[in-house]
Amino acid sequence: MKMTQIIQKKREGGALSPEEIRFFVEGLQNGETPDYQAAALLMAIYFRGMNQAETLELTSAMLQSGDSIDLSDLSGVKVDKHSTGGVGDKTTLVLAPLVAATGVPIAKMSGRGLGHTGGTIDKLEVFPGLTLELPTSQFIQQVQDIGIAVVAQTQSLVPADKQLYALRDVTATVGSIPLIASSIMSKKLASGCEAIVLDVKAGKGSFMPDEASAFNLANVLVEIGEGMGRRTVAVVTAMDEPLGHAVGNAIEVAEAIKTLKGEGPADLVELCLELGTQMLLLGNRANEEAEAKSLLMDAIHSGKALAKFKEMITRQGGDASSVDDPSLFPTAKYTHHLKSHDEGYLSSLNAKAVGVAAMALGAGRETKGSPIDLAAGIYLYKKRGDKVAKGDVLATLHAASPQQISEGILQLAEAFAFSAQPPAPAKLILGKKMIK
Ligand code: URA
């Protein structure tokens, strides 16, 4: 078999055989396929796509490129949750303890942030002493003991994805549905879960700017999950404006804690209840949506969800004092209140522009491995549909230097658009995909 033939076949729109897909993935791993041929094939896939069988085979070949976690010693249905990435998306910080507090075991491996979207593991770094890299046996033991662990993905989890993603990143081939779907699902499958709830974002701040492609991605993700024998539900949700009010790291953790205390912003609460409901249904903890929602609400109002969060931080060696006293979170040296020059209604708040501004302030990383400032970020006082008067504070920016503040202001100013009339209400939950 030759890579040139495989590239040519895909370039001409052919469907690759399982052997050809494995030859490509294995060749990449053992160094026999040079990057330039892998890149050419990725571009051919980008333009020609892959059918369901090819996408499933690619996922399976990627999954087998590394280790898989065996969670079979844990009792209960192990349900994982994944978001395709957005701005201000702190749902895992809320959902993991919330769902665990209802009795569904949460053994979660999360990623770090890249570009204008944040990552759970970076956010958890705000707790001094917290260990995010646990040996597998300890990870499983912790879930056995307290029902929850959230850790960083190990290096040996789907190494083929690391190679492929790095190539996609520099060849403008990230935005291909079969490549995104196989990348996400190979990691979910390797982390040992039995059921998966996916939050597929659609809109300006996400990978999928339009709803049709988000639904398309949702379909492919569900087909892969079910094809690999995992119950899978995908919820397509709007990511045109940031989720909640806080964008950054410490600032988002503080908002997640407020949400666990029952004081969260409406959009974040709505999303957590929707995704949590799907998790409880797949986890056989509830039979109906109403029952699941009431279990989740009870876990918040009884304080059990917050207590579970503290228990997890402490068990992983972290100092949880900031959960009760948010003033202990790292604070930025410089802040700036961005005031409105306009009046009317906020007709849109561009999530991508807010994410890029947060990155300029130091809250995100442009390239893998670059450091981030946990205290940097943005607090948005106004959200889409809110009435704004001239001089109202739209947002507060937090950063370590005046230069970063100036750059953040420049980027953030792009995010706001106003109208004289209130904009039509926008839906957050756009739809669901599942195989009944
Ligand atoms: N998230 C992933 O893990 N992979 C992609 O390709 C895109 C989003």
Image (spheres, grey):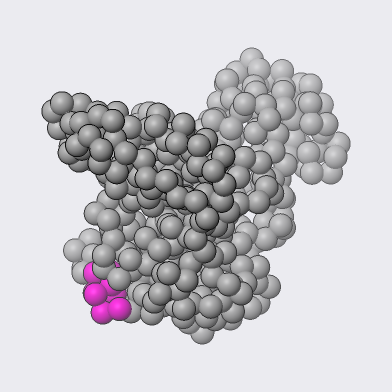
Q: Is residue 218 visible?
A: no
| Percent of width and height locating residue 410 | 46, 31
Magenta segment main secondary structure = helix
Q: Position of residue 273 (x, y in %)?
A: 28, 59
**Quadrant of the rendered image containing residue 176:** top right
Q: How many marks?
A: 0
Of 148 and 37, the residue lying toward us: 148
Q: Is residue 265 depicted above or below 237 in this figure?
A: below
Say which residue appears at 43% left-offset and 58% top-offset: 251
Residue 65 lies, in percent from the top left, at 72, 50
Q: Residue at image x 67%, y 60%?
A: 154
Asked if 124 appears above or below 59 in the picture, the reply is below
User: Does 316 appear above or below 329?
Assistant: below
Q: Residue 301 magenta-drawn?
A: yes
In screen coordinates, is 379 left or right of 131?
left
| Left or right for 196, reference 433 | right
Magenta stretch containing residue 91, yes or no?
A: no
Relative to the observer, which residue lies in front, 269 or 287?
Answer: 269
Looking at this rendering, what residue extends furthest in the top direction?
12
Residue visible at 26% across and 68% down?
262
> In which quarter of the view is residue 126 placed?
bottom right
Q: Can residue 129 be spotted in the picture? A: yes
Viewer-nearest residue: 367 or 153: 367
Q: Give the image location of residue 278, x and y in percent.
A: 33, 58
Residue pictured at 59% horizontal, 25% vertical: 46
Asked if residue 299 lies left or right of residue 322, the reply is left
Residue range (magenta) = 296-303
Q: Nearer the viewer, residue 274 or 66?
A: 274
Q: Quadrant of the N terminus?
A: top right
Please, is residue 75 above or below residue 8 in the view? below
